[in-house]
Amino acid sequence: MTRTASIGFPAAWDIAEWETLHAKGERPDRWPYGLDRLDDRYDLRTVPLSSNAFLPRLWTRRSERQSVAIGWEESSVFRLVASRQFEHVVGGVIWNTDPPVNARDRAIKAVYRRALRQASALWCLSRPQVALVKALLGLDSPPVHFLKFGIDTDFYRPTPLPPQPLVLSAGGDRDRDIPTLYAAMAEIKAARPETQVLVQTASDHPVPAGVVRVQRLSHRELRDLYGRASIVAIATRFNHHVSGMTVALEAAATGRPVVTTDTPGMSDYVDEASGRLTPAGDASAMAAAVVGLLDNPQQLRDLGRAGQHRVQTSHSTKTMSSAIGEIVAALPD
């Protein structure tokens, strides 16, 4: 008998619309994070997760519980655990190891930690974060696994390097270091004025002269920009959850070297064979790494090919969903 697995997504996400846009070639993967690829192992269902905690009257008696539910990050794990609908809840931890920013954030993290302790298994996308999560949850911690993040390698495909050099940066999570990125881009533009520089960000930080800023891009628009780029640069603040890894893998799948900040865990996604890692907050080191690659077209091509091979073999949503499947398969019936 095929085992049933329920995938929890925020209720605000329109999964049917995502599927439609994917079919039109506008979005990667049929479901977010490629979790639809678990369908080769399980009878999959989606569960809409309200932004409010489940009310006790919605809870299900133990005898009526379903088999297993999967949540991508801790807020989804919390809601799946709180629903009491599932024998097993499995999911990821991303933000809970960050220091709380205020009293409300501290309280939310504490509530999530109680739910995480009730999960049957957890994963982190950062190898160094595994030990932090185990220490945070203490003796009551369930098994915590390192899961290599993956992207849709059917959507992000290799393209030839462009004749006109373009340095691209994209992404806007809260650990992006826009001041350092802009300072590096300004140095690149000063050293190589013929190089185009484009940054996708919603930040209102002043944009240096010669740098083009766009606020938002669709998945397809970003994919097309990877194809026009020579190098992708990502600057982040120190963090343990590998901010920037999605853009790094998407760019590498396109055959583009990545120059990014060397934070804990990033070396599992970018290394010296496929890009360059530079110290946090060091704009000049990032600029020098980018300019050095622009001046060496053969190395640019070699790094791009190595990155593409690495993503294809180890960082696709197919390989990631297979690893999630192994975590779920190890759970008791």
Image (tube, grey):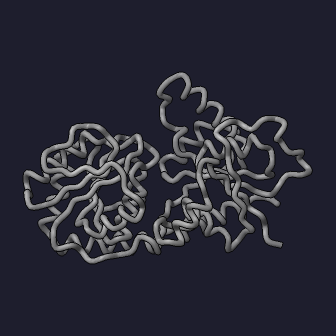
Query: Which of 227 and 177 lies nearest the eye of the viewer?
Result: 227
Q: Quadrant of the C terminus?
A: bottom right
Q: How many marks?
A: 0
287 to the left or right of 38: left
Name above or below for residue 165 compared with residue 131.
below
Q: Position of residue 227 (x, y in %)?
A: 30, 70
Q: Residue at point 33% right, 53% down? A: 170
Q: Residue at point 35% right, 75% down? A: 158
64 to the left or right of 175: right
Name above or below for residue 285 compared with residue 330.
above
Q: Quadrant of the N terminus?
A: bottom right
Q: Residue at point 50% right, 71% down? A: 24
Q: Residue furthest right?
A: 63
> Can residue 270 be spotted in the picture?
yes
Q: Position of residue 26 (x, y in %)?
A: 46, 67
Query: Which of 66 and 241 lies nearest the eye of the viewer?
Result: 66
Q: Position of residue 112 (x, y in %)?
A: 64, 36
Q: Position of residue 142 (x, y in %)?
A: 68, 46
Query: Which of 215 and 306 lies nearest the eye of the viewer?
Result: 215
35 to the left or right of 4: left
> Can residue 261 be spotted in the picture?
no
- Residue 32 quadrant: bottom right
- Residue 236 quadrant: top left
Q: Residue at point 39% right, 74% down? A: 157
Name above or below for residue 47 compared with residue 176.
below
